Amino acid sequence: AVTRREDYAPPAYWIKTVDLTFDLDPAKTLVFNRMQIERNEQVPVQALRLDGEDLNLTRVLVNGESVSFRVENHQLVLENLPAEPFTLEVRTTCAPEKNTQLSGLYTSSGGFFTQCEAQGFRRITYFLDRPDVMAVYTVTLKADKARFPVLLSNGNLIEQGELDGGHKHYAKWSDPFPKPSYLFALVAAKLVCREQKIRSRSGRDHLLQVYVRAGDLDKTEHAMRSLIASVAWDEARFGLSLDLDRFMIVAVSDFNMGAMENKGLNIFNTKYVLANPATATDTDFFGIESVVGHEYFHNWTGNRVTCRDWFQLSLKEGLTVFRDQEFSQDLAGSPSARAVKRIDDVRTLRQHQFPEDAGPMAHPVRPDSYMAIDNFYTATVYDKGAEVVRMMQTLVGREGFARGMTLYFERHDGQAVTCDDFAQAIADANPDSALARQLDQFKRWYSQAGTPRVHARGYYNAEMRTYRLELSQSCPPTPGQPDKAPFVIPVALGLVGRDDGRALPLQLVGENAAAGTERVLVLSETTQHFEFVGLDAEPVPSLLRGFSAPVVLEDTLSDAELLILLAHDHDPFNRWEAGQRLALNRLLAAVKGDGQVHLDAPVIDALRAVLHHPTLDAAFKELLLTLPGESYIAEQLEEVDPQRIHAVRESLRLQLAQALHADWEWAFDHYQVANEGYSPDAASAGRRGLVNLALGNLCLAAVERQSPLWPGKAYQRFKDADNMTDRLGALSALVGAHSELAEPALERFHALFKDEALVIDKWFALQASAPEKDGKVFARARQLLSHPDFSLRNPNRARSLITALCFSNPAAFHRRDAAGYVFWADRVLELDAINPQLAARVARAMDRWRQLAEPYRSAAREAIARVAARAELSDDVREIVTRALGD
Ligand code: ARG
Ligand code: ZN
């Protein structure tokens, strides 16, 4: 069944308080649920319909008396209820150990955990499981004391004690903040915690705790640090303080996503909590910082102000991603370190959101309909949603945006609201802004899907010393939206001197002075012209600086002009972009042409200059010297032959390794991190990243000319490394170069880390995402399915192999013999019986099948049709394959 945004109606009843008692047993847990309910006077009298799924109903009492009821369509229906507020008591049982979907109440490593967003609470008890029903919760947990010594729920611990002569124990929690059911959580398990008391700016004391399994305590320092930094940042940047005495993070190894912002009791995938230098890479450390921040920031943007309905998901997710991105940028510090984070975020957007916007799952940031809401926790809702918030900040300025946030909380604290309410608050706090003037049009970013294209053309008039910039926009059709109206697009720009790379003053015709060397133009019509005056020579335009809007920029810059930007642009984002485009131009020409790619001297010299540049950051150099990925290249083409793209890119990769050989050697030595203990700060992480990139290039060139020197060095480094970044870097250098030493290194790696689940995930992922050669990588991946450590039940492990192959390794996945598609269909069907949410994620690997050349395309369609033909498919997978087939 399809749910539509336009069908929203307020609930017929409010649930004011909930008193839950859990008698926890893995096989059969008893749930007693006492609710205070009252009619919503605004809507006509009607039956009360409570959602429930996979529950055994044992008792229903209204004001203590038994009543008649029925259960239909996963709902408990009660009619003829009292007109006055009443108490409803519902008793049910459920089987947490059988819950392989990991939604609702489930067991993991012998403990109990919950995941309720979006609709998991109905798998725990009957309820109005929708975010606009907010209640005050009291929760009592009872469990065996030896097996489940830690009992946690939202809010404050108000009582605890023993039961059954000490065999069992209980804990009673109360959360003073009314909340929607998706923010409920409980944990009952054998855990230990790292804790820290902090005093916030406001002078209030708080207890912060990070709960993990006993052996993992030495991996919690970074998560705690990140949490402390998050609390401080939200106070400093937005004046938002922690509103709880106690804030808990719990790590669990079976989890469908990254983490969850349950009020006061965040539950995290272990991947985003556990880290020490021996087991986690720099990337893992940064991931933890951003996810800890993200979940913490939800306490205001999501929990204090929540969503009226699930179509408004981006209200909290887009905004909170924006906030976590800003947090990480602010922690990074220097302008260039900020730019590195920005480039990373844009790469993610282009790699995941752009293809989504171009495929069968394209949907607006505020979707119009869904079959399974879990399918809409997407790159569009999260990452494009964050770009929409970022554009608002660009249009009203940083201070203006902070004012808008303040107004948003003044108006809506404690409410369940819509994306419109947010945009209105930002605009109302900035009445003179371009945002306020064009708010309705700006909000098309919420309602229209698809990635807009901005075409830019410049005309220089030497006589008048003017430069006329023509900007126009269009947006391709998406499913259900054939025609698009123009967007409001902020275009940040600068003009760069052709000869000296100088940042030129920007003065529009009619202005009496230049307004600096960077400004934001607002494109809101189909075509607009902007005329700059006082220019002695034709400038090189640097457009869409900092990626000021989530669009594809189509300009007419020549290679010569891109080389100027690469050498001189003051905007680091566009400097990086110029380098990427020079590489992309060559890759695309070869893919479309005769398949021969050639790295020419001007580009080699420019890249060499970047590598040796005296002031650019190592992390920035690493990004600049990494070629665009195969999926990004594919997105630029009408028709895609993944094998051809792979061959061309591999060839360019080798040329880059060979042409800069001496420079890579220099960089490898020059950027070594001084041996004074590992620290995951941005500067040393950047050096490690560049050293590892150099090592990868050196191994690649060495294997090609059959020299054992660099592979030998890499193997030694792999053995001696004192941190996971260097160890994994050396291992990937060997694997990526197809060195003979890769096998022994992989074996040794497995033996060293066989008890570290998150590291074994890396071991699977590295093999499944290795550059394909003669079909060996695919064969290996298929073999790994029967490795004793592999399991589809653990989402991280399943993803480590399947996502790595089907999403990150196009050349191994898209095979002329269709074996990759058979692999895909088999896994989707197997997973669907265990965990539909995860199955639906994997199913999306085929989104872009229509873009494939033959024979891939027909084989892909056939595989999707085979999945779709299965009668007993979950709604989650059904929605994905139906859309993919386009009927
Ligand atoms: N709200 C969580 C977060 O972004 C993610 C929840 C995902 N839920 C889902 N059903 N996929 O932090
Ligand atoms: Zn979130």
Image (tube, rainbow, N blue to C red):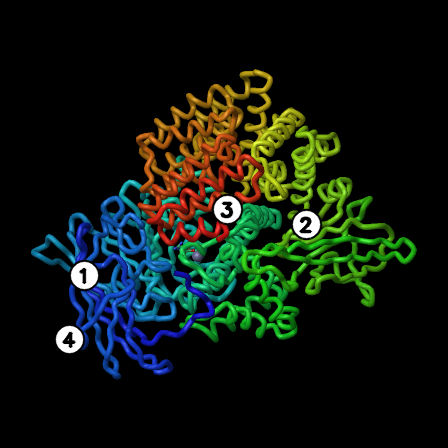
How far is the residue under mark 4 from the one under mark 3? Answer: 53 Å
Residue for point 27% across, 72% down: 17
Residue 673 lies left or right of residue 146; in this view the side is right
Q: Which residue is mark 2?
A: 571
Residue 781 lies left or right of residue 354; in this view the side is left
Q: Nearer the viewer, mark 1 or mark 2?
A: 2
Q: Which residue is mark 3?
A: 847
How far is the residue under mark 1 from the one under mark 2? Answer: 58 Å
- The reply to whether dot 4 and dot 3 touch (C-beta < 8 Å) is no
Work out whether mark 2 precedes mark 4 in sequence or the reverse, and give the earlier one. Answer: 4
The residue type indicated by label 4 comes to: Gly
How far is the residue under mark 1 from the one under mark 3? Answer: 51 Å
Work out whether mark 1 precedes mark 3 in sequence or the reverse, and give the earlier one. Answer: 1
State the residue in front, 607 or 36. 36
Number of other residues with Cα within 10 Å of mark 1, as a class: few under 14, some 14 to 19, many 20 or more: some
Q: Which residue is mark 1?
A: 160
Residue for point 38% across, 70% down: 132
- The reply to whether dot 1 and dot 4 touch (C-beta < 8 Å) is no
Q: Position of residue 879 (x, y in %)?
A: 43, 53
The residue type indicated by label 1 comes to: Gln
- Secondary structure, mark 4, is loop
Number of other residues with Cα within 10 Å of mark 3, as a class: few under 14, some 14 to 19, many 20 or more: many
**Numbered circles on residues, count:** 4
The residue type indicated by label 2 comes to: Asp
